[in-house]
């Protein structure tokens, strides 16, 4: 089933995208004010769409306008995948797909991601913002935490940029298989500790070893309560990359960061998305 939702305001686009993934959507295509995804054939399509509308409404507080139609899985995914190609992000990183091989020239670092069910294909501005900051934040041997690894893209980039141990945590069990495949495809499976779980204050205390870099491309509602715990978990001179924040939420995020003693080292905006680099 191909499911399309109209985005009533830009501020709700991220939550609706996450909502479509949570409903089982495989990849979410953004076109103007429409988000489209493919859902494996539900037994009761009308009932599924009704409950999907309720879930999206409770996530966003707005009544979403949903449309659906039948289309073979392969057709939609194939069309979406055909439109993808290699993308340069930052100075050295290049993200591509398994069927679009790119030679690694000069000091380029090519990351190959199979765009499947997990978030993090390189097609979203939040992922690109976080990748670009990893280039400046990661130093040789750094201990890195990737909060909400999704496809594993940031963990792979961190290793390729010279990180030491990388701990990649994802709360969605459905993302695990795709993430593991991507880690393996990029030859970093043995250097990334992949964990299905939720990074929260308890998780950070239990880890107890501290991080040189924390990359968290999640929602602002998740980030604000985590920020003070990130600050405690950072090693001296550590850096934090925050993504998944809408531009109009940036001021609140800056206030929350300043209250923890983290300094704003840099910020960038792509589309409606704000990404920043903080330092201890
Ligand atoms: C926007 S995606 C980011 C994926 C990838 N890291 C990227 O940058 O493209 C956010 C992911 O974080 C996961 N997530 C959200 N909060 C989390 C938490 N507290 N701990 C672990 N995973 C979390 C979600 O399930 C989702 O897969």
Image (cartoon, rainbow, N blue to C red):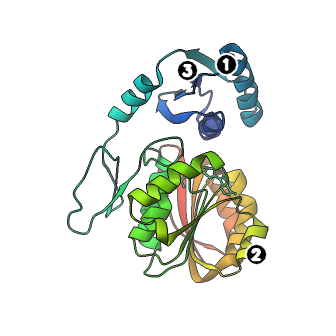
**x, y percent for residue 43:** 67, 19
Callout 3 environment at 10 Å: few (<14), some (14 to 19), or many (20+)? some
Q: Identify the disc placed on residue 161.
A: none
Q: CA distance from mark 1 to mark 2?
A: 43 Å
Q: Residue at x 73, y 36 (%)?
A: 59
Residue 106 visible to the viewer: yes
Left or right, 109 with respect to 56, comes to left
Q: Is residue 79 left or right of residue 247?
A: left
Q: Residue shown at 28%/45% (left/top)? A: 100
Q: Is residue 11 above or below residue 216?
A: above
Residue 205 placement: quadrant:
bottom right
Give the total number of marks visible in the rendering.
3
Q: Quadrant of the N terminus?
A: top right
Disc 1 crowd, CA 10 A, few/some/many (<14, 14-19, 20+): few
Residue toward you, 248 or 67 = 67
**First in residue order: circle 1 vs circle 2:** 1
According to the picture, the residue beneath numbered tag 2 turns out to be: 205
Q: Is residue 257 above or below residue 65?
A: below
Circle number at residue 43: 1
Residue 63 visible to the viewer:
no
Q: Residue furthest toward the bottom?
A: 236
Q: Nearer the viewer, mark 1 or mark 3?
A: 1
């Amino acid at each position: 089933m191909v499911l399309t939702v109209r985005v009533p305001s830009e501020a709700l686009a991220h939550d609706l995208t996450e909502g479509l993934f949570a409903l089982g959507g495989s990849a979410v295509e953004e076109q103007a004010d429409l988000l489209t995804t493919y859902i494996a054939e539900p037994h009761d399509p009308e009932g599924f769409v009704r409950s999907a509308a309720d879930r999206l409404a409770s996530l966003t507080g707005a009544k979403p306008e949903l449309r659906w139609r039948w289309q073979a899985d392969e057709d939609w995914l194939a069309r979406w995948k055909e439109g993808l190609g290699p993308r340069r992000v930052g100075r050295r990183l290049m993200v591509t797909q398994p069927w679009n091989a790119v030679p690694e020239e000069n000091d380029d670092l090519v990351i190959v991601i199979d765009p499947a069910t997990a978030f993090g294909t390189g097609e979203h501005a939040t992922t690109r913002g976080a990748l670009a900051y990893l280039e400046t934040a990661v130093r040789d041997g750094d201990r890195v935490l990737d909060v909400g690894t999704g496809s594993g893209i940031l963990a792979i980039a961190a290793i390729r940029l010279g990180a030491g141990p990388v701990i990649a945590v994802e709360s969605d069990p459905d993302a695990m298989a795709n993430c593991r495949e991507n880690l393996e495809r990029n030859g970093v499976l043995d250097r990334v500790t992949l964990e299905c779980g939720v990074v929260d204050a308890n998780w950070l205390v239990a880890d107890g070893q501290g991080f040189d870099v924390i990359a968290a491309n999640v929602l602002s509602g998740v980030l604000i309560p985590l920020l003070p715990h990130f600050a405690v978990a950072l090693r001296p001179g550590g850096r934090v990359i925050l993504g998944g924040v809408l531009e109009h939420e940036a001021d609140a995020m800056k206030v929350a960061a300043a209250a923890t003693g983290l300094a704003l080292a840099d910020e960038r905006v792509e589309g409606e998305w704000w990404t920043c680099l903080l330092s201890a």
